[in-house]
């Protein structure tokens, strides 16, 4: 397996492989959330979180493509099992927010490291990831705002679930 590239330092290769790992892990986190939500009857929210799961795989593919374009075989990571149980729909939404904050920090670190190395190919990719993270954070913040507006009574959570399903369409 080739691990050296003319245009990617070993540090960049490591960071890009880490990005692949974290995006694939994010997909699994959202898939676990979707499964839990579906099991609890929140079919709209389940649909939305399944969509989030699918989007994370697209993100992982972008990092893989950068590695491949530079002659590096991406590492297929072993992934730990994500959390399987949640307390409620609000718990899922809050967990998603915390996860997106963590991923945003990682994307900033990738972009900063690429900028420090003056690796503008990776800077551009990092900026793309940062833009995606701004969108992801906005989506989850919207859900939190709706949760605050709806409240946590059962009937209101059903209304929120329905709205989340419409967001997935």
Image: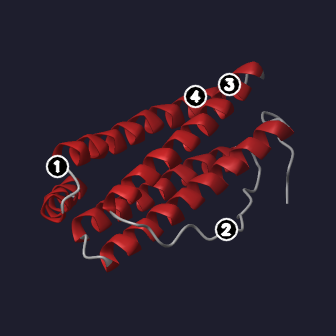
Give left or right: position of 49 versus 111.
left
Disc nearest the viewer among 1 and 3? 1
Q: Residues within 10 Å of mark 4 (few under 14, many from 20)?
A: some
- Compared with 159, 97 (above or below) is above
Residue drawn where x is 47% and y is 72% of the image: 85
Residue 150 badge: 1
Q: Quadrant of residue 157?
A: bottom left
Q: Along the horizontal axis of the image, is 15 left or right of 39?
A: right
Label 1 – label 2 distance at C-alpha:
34 Å
Which residue is disc 4 drawn over?
124
Residues packed near mark 3 inside 10 Å, few (<14), some (14 to 19) or many (20 plus): some
- Frontmost of labels 4 and 3 is 3
Disc 3 designates what residue? 112
Residue at horizontal 30%, vertical 44%? 144
Asked if marks 1 and 4 touch (Cβ < 8 Å), the reply is no
Q: Is residue 17 above or below residue 27?
A: above
Could you tell me which secondary element the residue under label 1 belongs to?
A: helix
Confirm or deny contact between disc 1 and disc 3 (CB under 8 A).
no
Q: Is residue 5 left or right of residue 132?
A: right
Question: Mark 1 or mark 3, which has the lower sequence index?
Answer: 3
Q: Nearer the viewer, residue 117 or 82?
A: 82
According to the picture, the residue beneath numbered tag 2 turns out to be 80
Marks 3 and 2 sit apart, C-alpha to C-alpha, by 27 Å
């Amino acid at each position: 397996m080739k691990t050296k590239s003319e245009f990617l330092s070993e540090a960049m290769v490591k960071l890009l492989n880490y990005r692949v790992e974290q995006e694939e892990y994010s997909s699994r986190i959202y898939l676990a959330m979707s499964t839990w939500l579906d099991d609890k009857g929140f079919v709209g929210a389940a649909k939305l979180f399944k969509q989030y799961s699918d989007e994370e795989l697209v993100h992982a593919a972008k990092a893989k493509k950068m590695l491949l374009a530079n002659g590096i075989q991406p590492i297929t990571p072993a992934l730990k099992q994500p959390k399987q149980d949640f307390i409620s729909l609000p718990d899922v939404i809050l967990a998603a927010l915390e996860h997106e904050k963590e991923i945003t920090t990682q994307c900033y670190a990738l972009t900063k490291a690429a900028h420090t190395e003056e690796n503008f190919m990776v800077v551009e990719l990092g900026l793309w990831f940062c833009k995606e993270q701004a969108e992801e954070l906005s989506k989850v913040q919207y859900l939190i705002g709706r949760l605050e507006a709806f409240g946590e009574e059962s009937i209101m959570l059903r209304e929120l679930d329905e709205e989340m399903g419409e967001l997935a369409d």
